[in-house]
Image (cartoon, grey):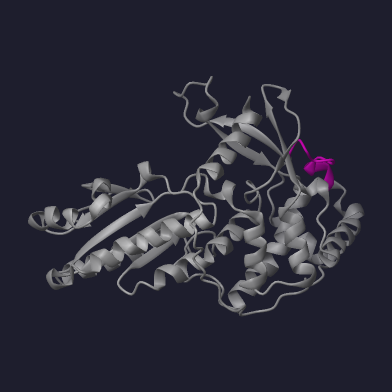
Amino acid sequence: MFLNFFVNKVEDIRASITTPLVSLCTSVAPVSTWSSFSPVSLQDIQDLVRKMKPTSSPVDIIPTSLLLNVFDEVGPWLVKLINLSLKSGTVPSYFKHALVNPILKKPNLDPGQPINYRPISKLPFMSKMMEKVVAKQLTSIMEDNDLYDKYQSGFRSIHSTETALVKVSSDVMMAADSGRYTVLTLLDLTSAFDTVDHNTLIHRLKSEMGFSGAVLQWFASYINGRTFNVAFNDVMSNVSTLSCGVPQGSVLGPVLFLLYLMPLGRLIRGFKNVSYHFYADDIQLYCSFNDSEFHFLPEFLDCISCIKNWFSSNYLQINPNKTETLIIAPDKKIPLIKNSLGDLGSSVKSSIRNLGVVFNQSMSLEG
C-alpha cells in the first residue's frame, strides 16, 4: 500500500506539470572546474566517524555498533573502498538502497490513510560515511568558488532560518520607515526534493558548476539507480527504483537540491525591483514601492509568472493552496494594492507564518 502510494504520488506530480513550450535559459559559463576528488586517509575517516551519530539502519550489513568496535581492523578496508569509489566515479549499489519507514505526521490523523504518513528514509551507515567525505570536498569547492546563492540560507554553515528572517524583516521594516509599502509572497513547493529531474541535475553540475571527469561520473552514479523498499508493521514491500528526486535522509541530497535551484536566483535577479530569499525550497519574494512606484507591481507579477514557468521546466510544482501574500502598508492603502495584484490578490492574508514566525501588516513579529 505505502510503496505504491509513495511512488504514484511523485509520478502524479510530475505528470501534472505542464512544461512551457519555451524553456527559460539562465545558464552561465562554469566558474570552476572540478574533475577529481582528493583521496582520503585513515585519519580523515577516523575523525569523521567520531563526529557521526552511531545510528544503525536495517539495511546495514554490519551493525554500526559492531563496525565502530572493530574499526581499527576494518578502517583501512573502508578507506580503500571509499577512495576506489571516488577515483572510479562509481557508487556501490548497496550504498544506494534505502529502507523507508512511514511515520504518522500527527497523532490525531487517520492511520488508515497513506497520505497522513511521512516517509522516513534510512540509509546504510557506511554510505553516509562516504557522503560526508564527498560533502566536505563539495562544500569547500562551493565556498572557494563562491557558488552558493548569497540569498540562500538553507543547508549552509553559519546560516539558518534566522538568517533568512532577519534579512527579509529588516528590508521590509526599513522600507516602511521610509514610507514605502511591501508585498511579500511566500511560495510553497509540492514534494520538491522528490521531483528533481536527474538528467537536468547532472547537466547543471556539468554546464554550470563545472564538474567533469570522475567527479561528474560519481555524482551521476550516486543519483541514478537508487532503490528502496518500505517497512511497516513488520511487513516488507518489494524493492522499487527511484527515477527522480534527490535521496531523502542523505547527506548530499539537500546540497544537490541547492545546486538544482541555482539558476532560479539568477532569474529573479533579472527583475531589478524584486527581492528574494530562499531557505532550501521555501521562497520569500517581495517588492517595496511608494505611491509613485505602483508600476513595480506588474514587474513583481511578471517575476512570479517566470518563476512558475521555470519550475515547470524543471519538474517542480508550486502548491497554489499554500501560496500566501502579505501586504505591509497602512490599512487605507491595502485595498488598492490588493486590487493591483490580479489573481495573486486571492492569496492575500492579514498575517502569514514565515519559517515559524508570524508576519502581520504591522510587522510585530510573533513566534
Q: Is residue 64 magenta?
A: yes
Displayed quadrant of residue 229: top right
Q: Is residue 192 magenta?
A: no
The answer to whether residue 151 is above or below residue 327 is: below
Could you tell me which residue is drawn at 70 percent across and 59 percent down?
132
Could you tell me which residue is drawn at 59 percent across and 74 percent down?
143
> Looking at the image, which residue sits at the far left?
332
Could you tell me which residue is drawn at 88 percent across and 48 percent down?
70
Give the image location of residue 47, x and y in percent.
75, 62
Displayed quadrant of residue 2: top right
The magenta segment = 57-67
Q: Residue 359, can we see it?
A: no
Q: Main secondary structure of the magenta part?
A: loop
Give the image location of residue 330, x and y in percent.
11, 58
Give the image location of residue 248, x and y in percent.
63, 46
Closer-to-camera residue (144/263): 263
The answer to whether residue 172 is above or below residue 124 is: below
Give the image location of residue 117, x and y in percent.
54, 30
